[in-house]
Amino acid sequence: MPTRSPYIHEYHAIDYSTIWIRWERLSPKYAGGILRGYRIYYIFAYKYDHSGYVRNITVGPDVLEMIITGLKPDTDYRVWVKAFTSKGEGGDENRAYIRTSKSFLRSK
């Protein structure tokens, strides 16, 4: 099982309902076995909005970026990436906070 999570080093809103993230490849030194892939998790960033729940997308070990669509406009999201092996997932200590745009303007 991985001993740490990949670092999210780039991210931004693409438009009012889409965000993009890129993370580092997890070093074999931290994988704790053969890396099977990554899970990208996201949820509304604030607890007062109880209508959301944690969603995730699973990708292979060679994928290092993701476009997440279908999000609420002008909303803050908390996003994190976990690496996983056949023995389980690593931690989620590296998180990004990303706000979708009100308009089609590109923001960071």
Image: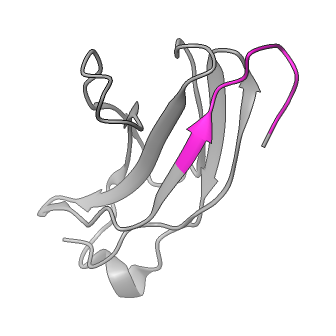
Q: Quadrant of residue 40?
A: top left
Residue 100 sits inside the magenta stretch = yes
Q: Quadrant of residue 14?
A: top right
Q: Nearer the viewer, residue 20 or 37?
A: 20
Quadrant assignment for the N terminus: bottom left
20 lies left or right of 53: right
Q: Residue at (32%, 55%) from the top-left corner?
A: 36
Q: Residue at (32%, 61%) from the top-left corner?
A: 92
Residue 73, relative to residue 37: is it above or below?
above
Q: Residue at (29%, 69%) from the top-left corner?
A: 34
Quadrant assignment for the C terminus: top right
Q: Position of residue 19 (x, y in %)?
A: 64, 30
Q: Position of residue 81 (x, y in %)?
A: 41, 53
Q: How is the image coloured?
A: one colour
Residue 62, relative to residue 74: is it above or below?
below
Q: Nearer the viewer, residue 92 or 77?
A: 77
Q: Residue at (29%, 35%) from the top-left corner?
A: 47
Q: Position of residue 50 (x, y in %)?
A: 24, 21
Q: Nearer the viewer, residue 28 or 104?
A: 104
Magenta residues?
97-107
Q: Residue furthest left?
A: 87
Judge whether residue 66 can be spotted in this image.
Answer: no
Q: Quadrant of residue 102?
A: top right
